[in-house]
Amino acid sequence: MLTVSNISKSFHYKSVLKNIHFSLSPGETIALIGKNGAGKSTLLRILAKISTPENGQVEFENNNILTGVAANRQGIYYCGHAPGFYPSLTAGQNLNYISAFHGCSNTTEKISSILQDYHLFDAIDEPVKVYSQGMLQRLKLAMIELIDWSLLLIDEPFNSLDMAGREFVKNKMQAWQNGKRCILFVDHDIKRALELSSRILLLDKHSIAMDEPTSSPSLVVKITEFME
Amino acid sequence: MSFLFQDRLTRSLLIITVILMALNLYTIFVITPMVPEQHWAQKIFYVHVPIAWTGFLSYFIVMVAGILFLVKKESRWDRVGLAAAEIGTLFVILVLITGPIWATPIWGRPWIWEPRLTTTLILFLIYVGYFMLRKFGGHPERVARYAAVLGILAFIDVPLIFYSVKFWAPQFQLHPQVEMVQQPTGIINPFFFSLSTFTFLFILMLRLRVRILNFQYQIKSNNV
Amino acid sequence: MFTTLLKKELFVELRNKEVVLSMLAFGMSVLLIYSFSLSGDPKINHEMAPGLFWSMVVLSSTLGLHRLFGQEKDFDAFASLIAAPIDRSTLFLAKWVSGVIFLTITEFLIILPFFLFLGLSWPVSHFQGIGIVLLGNMGIVAVGVIISGLAMRAKMSAVLLPVLLFPLITPLLIASVKATTGWYHVIPFSHWQFWVLIMVTYVVIFGLAGYIFFDHITEE
């Protein structure tokens, strides 16, 4: 589904990513882990074509997404660290426009139903600039339900959520995986990452230091050694 | 310093440029005829126009390097563009200094919105912005792309700037233009010699500056 | 997709009115400065009116252009926009058209005070004048969107924008003033058609430049 070849990226002449190679297949849920500053968010932003790498190639469904036409990125949805919404628009308006950018049209009823599901219906008419961090995080996740994606890139989905919220998102992530989609997510909680994913990609010293299935024996020990 | 002149081509270029410049200065001060009405002031012409030519050539190189950087995505083209921008701006500042020095005795006033000089001034202001963008635009990898786009926009604006200024206020721009084709050989030959000399100087300066920038880049990118 | 993007730009502006209001407020301040800085002689104001109008438009446009991307920077909505499978050139076109609309609305709101405060006579014909103003707006916004995109992530972006923009639009400014003078002072078109040609050339060149280069300036 996704093939990443030889991706390198620097900031202020310092290498953040060096010769990154990996592939993703349908049905996989992959956790991208690593220390702070390892380049996890940068990698996701490159795959979403928000950031330009110095070299390398990314192919999605055998189409080049870095230099090809915009339509080659149809099916990829990026959910980043920042809210990614228009602060003066309401939740419903934001969901409407952003799903339209991805070529999806959703009825008002569907949007209302999703917002209810994510406990945001009461604030439906408020501009998102008044939302709390937790509400913004839930809104970002609600957005995912409205896009017809086959590859989800999600950066720290459990940020700013209380215990109930985190449980809710865990269940959602398991429900999203239908065997044909691929989810690549960043998480700092190793235990949770191992629980949710079928494969681990560990970024260390600017490259993929580990690429193993979660069923691999003594994986936790290996990861702990790296992280220390 | 030795790494700057480590290869034969650069050393040869340096020697040729020094010799040419020495000959050029001798030609300007000793050989060229004294124009009756303008006397010594006229001799600035042999320096002012070649410097202007070199400045515009530099900015043309900035545009070409910008295009090559965006197409090939090789950082060396960004360094060529930056070097050419620096040299071009230096020469353009000299044009803006020598122009009014020449204009005062010839046209009676230091500044009269002459189209070529005005175009030079506007390009200089664009490049003030270019260097501000380089400094404040963010991390160098991103700024390289931005600077490439700006360098291209700046040069494609040049003909528009020139023609709009040329026809802007003709009543204030009446002045004798130096028409090259009408000049005698005693003036035109030294002029073209000076033009060639400054072109060699530009090539040498560009080569040296790119070498320094490449060296700086190697140091910074290896210092992880 | 262009229609969706344009609708979004217009709708966001309708909600917060940042672009038009900032340009309008600044334009009115500039107009006030002109009113007190000039001698007050209607004849001189009549002579200088086209230059005063366009300098006011150029100065106020910087605030609007800054906010055109500024509102997408706040919650990183810009990342959502460029991560979507949208052709970046289409994004440029949407920003360009919406910018022209906002600038034209601002001019429409400020034109009456402009004539009143400077004691100017109302022009005889309108269509040519509207055409010149639209052409000028298209040129300013085409370059403005590119420069605003460059400056958006920079430090001192509010300073960088006018420093980069003003020298680049010099030919357009000269041509707009000359064409407006020709129209406002009822000079035959043949005397100022050259300046309209310069304006059209400028709009075409920089419109194309924005269409081609916008992709390179949207990414981090």
Image (cartoon, coloured by chain):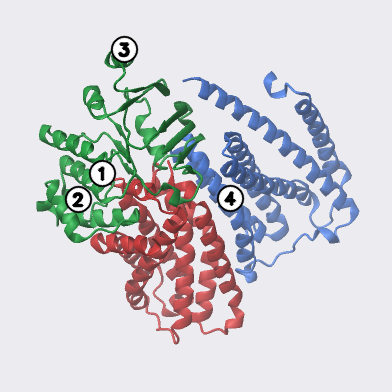
Circle 4/circle 1 CB separation < 8 Å: no
Same-chain status of marks 4 and 1:
no
Report which residue position mark 2 lands on: A128
Tags 3 and 4 in contact by the CB under 8 Å rule? no
**Which colour is chain C painted?**
red
The residues tagged by marks 1 and 3 sit, at their Cα atoms, a distance apart of 33 Å
Left/right placement of residue A217 relative to residue C198 reads left
What residue does disc 1 label? A83
Letter of the chain shown blue in the rendering: B
Q: Quadrant of the N terminus of chain B?
A: top right
Amino acid type, label 4: Ile
Residue A219 image position (x, y, % from top left): 30, 16
> Crowding at label 3, few (<14), some or many (≥20) Cα neighbours within 10 Å?
few
Pointer 2 indicates a residue of which chain? A
Q: Looking at numbered disc 3 in the image, what kind of residue is underneath it?
A: Glu
Q: CA distance from mark 3 to mark 4?
A: 50 Å
Can the viewer see residue A217? Answer: yes
Q: Chain A: what color?
A: green
Q: Which residue is mark 3?
A: A225
| Camera-nearest residue between C208 and B203 | C208
Q: Chain of mark 3?
A: A
